[in-house]
């Protein structure tokens, strides 16, 4: 009888511990994903977004495995920009609170179309569009396909994505690594040190790929990225004011320079000493971005719609 009571108490304590751990996990996930905002249907995929501030609409597009809350809110960018603009930040499909298809055909061009469908959903004619890393490549594709929907574009931490065998092989290597909870090829491409990751770095990769994201969805994002390529003709015909801010230590700097050489109406700003992981959180980045947006913001936000 005594043994039975001890077993019952032990089971109860274990159940309580599991409940506490589950609660902590949910809390941690909510902290990473941020406050829940709104949803809309984008060609059958449920997309999450937040909408705050007033003025000329500004659409924020985050990077790979780095949902809007981490890219824009926890870095203070939403707070700073929403003082002057109506800031709309979406979780790209495959990320955050948005749906996560496993089919590569659901990414690439569809991620650029999500931006246009979101503007349609909100009845916004034109907006500033600011993207970083993967979000920068998506932004460039959007302005090539729908220049009439963009006031100005900041495609930062990004460059010219060309349809080459090398880029296709890289996308497949990233996809296979992410499926295993790794990120070696991507870290190396972005300018990371060419060495084995530390325990904490490996843990960070695991959390970003498998905890609040779906590794199979991220692999599909990587494979679908080949749809974001642009031709030289598309770059030369660009009529949207475009800015690229990138760090001097970013592995994508050669791609950004190639973009600057070919793209019309384009400005390139290289921040000395900054890399892919810390350019967007720097004061110089925000200062340059705000100056660019102010320069291209119409006197009256006619395209902003009432809520």
Image: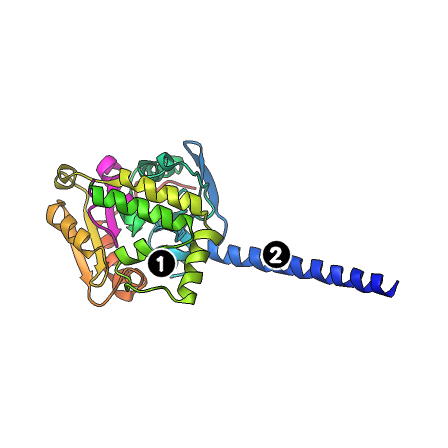
On the question of residue 151 being in view, the answer is no
- Residue 3 vertical position relative to residue 39 in the rendered view, above or below: below
Residue 214 x %, y %: 46, 47
Q: Count the marks: how many?
A: 2
Membership of 213 in magenta stretch: no
Describe residue 115's horizontal placement relative to residue 245 as left or right.
Answer: right
Q: Secondary structure at mark 2?
A: helix
**Magenta segment, which residues?**
138-163
Quadrant of the rendered image containing residue 273: bottom left
Residues at circles 2 and 1 in contact by the CB criterion of under 8 Å = no
Q: Which residue is mark 1?
A: 77
Q: Quadrant of the C terminus?
A: top left
In the rendered image, residue 170, in percent from the top left (x then y), is placed at 27, 47
Between 116 and 170, the residue placed more toward the observer is: 170
Could one spot residue 15 in this view of the protein?
Answer: yes
Residue under the image location 40 percent in, 36 percent down:
103
Q: Nearer the viewer, residue 204 or 151?
A: 204
- To which quarter of the image does residue 123 belong? top left
Name of the residue lying farthest toward the top: 43
The numbered mark, 2 or 1, whose residue comes first in the sequence reads 2
Quickly name the residue at label 2. 22
Quadrant in which the N terminus is drawn: bottom right
Magenta stretch containing residue 162, yes or no?
Answer: yes
Tell me residue 257's x, y (percent): 15, 53
Residue 160 horizontal side relative to residue 47, left or right? left
* Residue 135 image point, x, y percent: 31, 48
How far is mark 2 from mark 1, CA to CA? 31 Å
Q: Nearer the viewer, residue 131 or 17?
A: 17
Q: Label 1, secondary structure: give it.
A: helix
The label shown at residue 271 is none
């Amino acid at each position: 009888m005594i043994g039975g009571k001890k077993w019952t108490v032990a089971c109860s304590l274990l159940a309580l511990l599991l409940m506490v751990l589950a609660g902590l996990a949910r809390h941690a996930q909510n902290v990473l994903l941020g406050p829940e905002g709104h949803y809309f249907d984008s060609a059958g995929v449920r997309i999450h977004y937040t909408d705050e501030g007033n003025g000329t609409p500004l659409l924020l597009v985050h990077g790979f495995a780095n949902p809007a809350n981490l890219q824009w809110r926890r870095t203070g960018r939403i707070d700073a920009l929403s003082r002057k603009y109506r800031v709309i930040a979406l979780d790209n499909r495959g990320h955050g609170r948005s749906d996560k298809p496993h089919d590569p055909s659901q990414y690439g061009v569809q991620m650029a179309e999500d931006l246009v469908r979101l503007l349609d959903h909100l009845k916004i004619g034109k907006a500033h569009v600011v993207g970083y890393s993967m979000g920068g490549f998506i932004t460039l594709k959007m302005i090539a396909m729908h220049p009439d929907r963009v006031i100005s574009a900041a495609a930062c931490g990004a460059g010219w994505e060309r349809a080459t065998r090398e880029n296709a092989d890289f996308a497949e290597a990233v996809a296979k690594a992410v499926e295993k909870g790794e990120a070696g090829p991507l870290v190396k491409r972005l300018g990371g040190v060419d060495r084995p990751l530390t325990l904490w770095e490996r843990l960070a990769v695991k959390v970003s790929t498998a905890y609040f994201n779906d590794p199979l969805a991220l692999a599909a994002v990587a494979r679908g990225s080949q749809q974001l390529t642009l031709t030289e003709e598309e770059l030369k015909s660009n009529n949207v004011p475009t800015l690229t801010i990138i760090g001097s230590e970013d592995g994508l700097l050669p791609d950004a320079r190639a973009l600057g050489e070919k793209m019309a109406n384009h400005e390139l700003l290289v921040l000395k000493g900054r890399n892919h992981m810390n350019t967007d959180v720097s004061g110089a980045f925000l200062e340059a971005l705000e100056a660019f947006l102010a320069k291209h913001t119409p006197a009256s936000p006619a395209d902003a719609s009432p809520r």
